[in-house]
Amino acid sequence: MIRRSHSGVITRWGDALLEACALPGRYASALIFILIFVVLVTVVGAQFGLSDLAKWETRIPLLGTHLNMTSLGELQWHLFSLLIMLSGAYALKEDRHVRVDVLSTRLSDRTRLYIDIFGDLFLLLPFFALLAWYSLGFTQMAFQFGEQSNAGGLVDRYLVKAVLPIGSVLMLGAGVGRILRNVAMLLSLRKSDPTAERPAQ
């Protein structure tokens, strides 16, 4: 009874952490529509030989004081970076990440949990901890030097580079949450399912 209550608490903590880290990715999926629109405008603009699309006086973050075809081209990979880095934690929460299904389906539930816990502890967490650490300095350097496009496109390049540490922290949180959830499932499985070691049919 004590083990079940402990596993219930661990599950709630793990699920809460997973949900919080996956929330940005849930809404980041809407960026795909903006990305498609930007691609369409870029293609149409290239067909008509357009260059400068708009200019204004007040400086806007990322865009600066103008919008041209170079800006639109660079905006595509900015949006793609946002989409990928913010959606990783959501994919992990929903178990949509890539795995070797041919092998996974032949393993028992307990073995799959052990593999996930081991992978998250020794592969996922160290990788994204290092990425968060190094990309933070990468972003700070871009901010301090005022890095911007060399082709007259977007400015404030630190904004897109900041997605690396932010996305890494989200993946770290999601990884910890999944570890907690899987440990709780392992405890419950050990207590209630004596056949868990049998491979799935």
Image (cartoon, grey):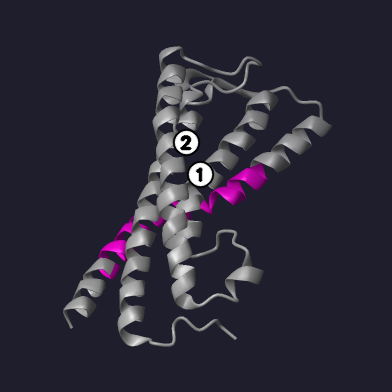
Question: What residue would you read off at disc 2?
Answer: 164
Residue at 44% in and 68% down: 113
Q: Which residues are magenta?
A: 11-37
Classed neighbour count for the residue bearing mark 2: other residues with Cα under 10 Å, few (<14), some (14–19), many (≥20): many
Quadrant of the rendering where the N terminus is positioned:
bottom left
The image quadrant of residue 191 is: bottom left
Residue extending farthest to the top is 145
Q: Which label number is shown at residue 85?
A: 1
Residue at 62% in and 44% down: 35
Residue extending farthest to the left is 2
Under mark 2, the amino acid is Leu
Residue 102 placed where, x, y %?
66, 70
Q: Which label number is shown at residue 133?
A: none
Comes first in the chain, label 1 or label 2: 1
**Marks 1 and 2 close (CB-CB < 8 Å):** yes
Residue 55 placed where, x, y %?
58, 20
Residue 22 placed where, x, y %?
41, 56
Q: Is residue 125 magenta?
A: no
The image quadrant of residue 166 is: top left
| Vertical placement of residue 25 versus 142, above or below | below
Quadrant of the rendering where the C terminus is positioned:
bottom right
Q: Nearer the viewer, residue 32 or 138?
A: 138
Residue at 40% in and 39% down: 129
| Vertical placement of residue 24 versus 73, above or below | below
Residue at 60% in and 33% down: 75
Q: Element under label 1?
A: helix
Residue 100 placed where, x, y %?
63, 64
